[in-house]
Image (tube, rainbow, N blue to C red):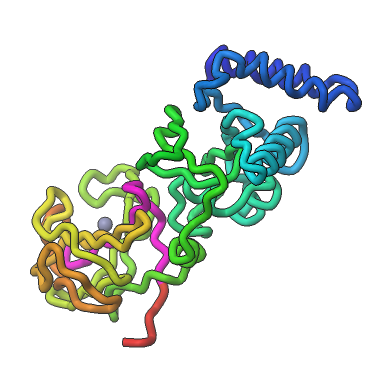
Amino acid sequence: MATAKNRSYFCAVDRYLNVRASLRRRLHAVVVALVLGPLAGTAFASEIMTLPSIRSGNAIRLLRDEISQNVKSSMRGQGLAVPIRFARYTVAKDDNFYRIVTSTHQDPDTLASLNHLAAAADLAEGDQILIPNARGIFREEGGPMSVYIPDAKMHFFAGLRFHPEESKIFRGNDFVYPLHKFIVTSSYGTRLDPFTNKQTFHGGMDLAAPEGTPVLASRPGKVVFCGNLGGYGNLVVLDHGHGYRTLYGHLKAFTVKRGAMVAAGAQIATVGSTGRSTGPHLHFEMRKDGQLARPRLVHDTTY
Ligand SMILES: [Zn+2]
């Protein structure tokens, strides 16, 4: 997105912020109109600016000001006072999700839904996230009240919040380990591929256990896939609602059928070594809105 268009937008914003404080409010509307003029009335944004800091500087001050204006206008039922736009921010070492929410004057649901975050702990140093100038929910599916945003390929529902259950899942501790006893042989992230001996990205967590060990559902859900799929070998996919899915790969055998509803801790399959596997283990993967997420699992003491 580093285009000449972006740079000219950035310069315009810088020029605007260098004017005397007393003129800022009055000029704001003019500058925004000039910059976003071609977009006025089209209800979508194509500009993504870089946010160098969430603590100080002109860019974060402008973003907070626009969020505040949009919150006020949405609450009055007047839609967005400032057309929606996004800032791109690279997560720093001392950041965490809630600190970013507070510093930017955003709310958790807005940042989580826009960035497909599966959990508050899903952000790590160096990750890039988008921060919008309005609060609401971003979804891939549209609706009558939505605004379509081409860059994010998502629909925006101003002022909407998460369903309480989605908030609960996002806050964490909702998914349990899918095996009673195991050894973690590979975690989520970059690793040395055992087949190619090259650094590759591992999208899940590998839990080694003897062949035939029961594989348990990590959370209540519906079996949406049960079959053989490429490198995964025998695979079960559970849908947990609110865009959350878990995948269980390299299975030996299935103990559930597609369409079945399963409880947390219920057996769904047995550990095997089918597909692209070097020995009996479970490849466990978590997805949010179809995108890979860093698995966050807890030990369940109820079974
Ligand atoms: Zn794996």
Q: How far from the left and from the top, in percent, is residue 120?
A: 52, 58
- Residue at 47%, 48% (x, y): give it: 113
In this rendering, the count of numbered labels is 0
Q: Is residue 283 magenta?
A: yes
- Residue at 30%, 71% (x, y): give it: 220
Q: Measured along the vertical axis of the image, is residue 193 above or below residue 185?
A: above
Q: How far from the left and from the top, in percent, is residue 256?
A: 12, 71
Can residue 21 be spotted in the picture? yes
Q: Nearer the viewer, residue 194 or 36?
A: 36
Q: How far from the left and from the top, in percent, is residue 158?
A: 54, 43
Locate residue 232: give its quadrant. Answer: bottom left
Locate residue 11: give its quadrant. Answer: top right
Locate residue 99: give its quadrant. Answer: bottom right
The quarter of the image that holds ligand 1 is: bottom left
The outermost residue toward the bottom is 302
Q: Measured along the vertical axis of the image, is residue 5 above or below residue 133?
A: above
The magenta region covers 278-297
Q: Measured along the vertical axis of the image, is residue 179 above or below residue 152?
A: below
Q: Nearer the viewer, residue 111 or 42?
A: 42
Quadrant for the C terminus, please.
bottom left
Q: Is residue 170 magenta?
A: no
Task: Please indicate whether residue 49 sits to the left or right of residue 151 in the image.
Answer: right
Q: Nearer the viewer, residue 14 or 159?
A: 159
- Residue at 58%, 38% (x, y): give it: 132
- Residue at 13%, 48% (x, y): give it: 230
Can residue 278 be spotted in the picture? no
Q: How far from the left and from the top, in percent, is residue 250?
A: 16, 61
Task: Please indicate whether residue 281 sits to the left or right of residue 36 in the image.
Answer: left
